[in-house]
Structure formats: C-alpha cells, structure tokens
Amino acid sequence: MILGSQFFSALVLLFGAAVLAYTTFSFAHVKITDADMEELDRMRSEGLLPATPDTIADFQLLRKKISDIAPAVYLRQEAWLYSYFYLLRAARWARPSAWLDRELHRLHAHQAHHYRVALTRLHALQYPTV
C-alpha cells in the first residue's frame, strides 16, 4: 500500500498501466510508419494470403505462419507487435476511425514483411549455396 491507502495504490497502478499503454503505442507507431504497404499486394498475388482482404484474419494467419517456421529460421517475434495489435483492436472497438484502420493496415504490412524475411531465411536453409 502506498501511504497506507488502497486508493493511492490503485491510482498508481492505473497510472502505470496508462503509461505502459502509451509507451507501447508510441514505440509501435514509430516502428510501423515505414512499413512496405505493397508487400500485402505481392503476398496476395503470390497466393500466400487470401484474395479477399480481412485485416484481422490476415494478421492472425501471418502470425500463425510465422510461429510455425520461426524456430527453424531463428526469427523472434516481437512482443510489442501483439500488444499493439490488441490495443488497436480495443481502440477501434471503442471508437472506430479511419486512422485506426490505416494503423492496423500498416501493422499488417509490417507483419507481412517479417513473414517474407522468414520465408527468405527458410529458402536459404533449404537450398544453401556454396
């Protein structure tokens, strides 16, 4: 307890959670601003993603695909990526906006880039050059 008060302890906990959410949001926003948006179109044309775009389902599909091959190519998935994904979904549920949809799309493109890197590494392992 802080200062012998349960109220202050709860207030500090809420403040800490708000700061954590804000820092995750800021860090993730900066990381995905330069995501290659064309990567999603390339993946759709190659058949790696379904032809009909669905941001939530496609993100989860890429997450599953990356987690399947990640141990083989030594690719560590970023923890902030999923917390930002769920934070955006909660914000979008609370107050839908075009900006949140664009941010989810950028996050999806960032994840698609990671999948492309994993596929490239897996291909290099399967077909090594001397």
Image (spheres, grey):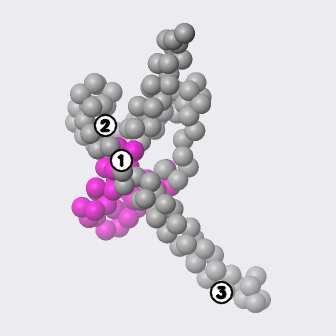
Point out the tag, 3 or 1, that comes first from the N-terminus.
Answer: 3
- Quadrant in which residue 16 is drawn: bottom right
- The label shown at residue 66 is none
Q: Which quadrant is home to the N terminus?
A: bottom right
What is the x, y in percent for residue 110? 39, 44
Mark in the foreground, 2 or 3 = 2
Q: CA distance from mark 2 to mark 3?
A: 49 Å
| Residue named by callout 3 | 7
Image point 56% across, 34% down: which residue? 75
Magenta-colored span: 82-110
Considering only vertical position in the picture, is 30 above or below 2? above
Closest to the observer, 95 or 112: 112
Q: Main secondary structure of the magenta part?
A: helix
Of helix, strand and loop, which one carries label 3? helix
Dot 1 corresponds to which residue?
Answer: 35
Mark 2 sits on what residue? Answer: 39
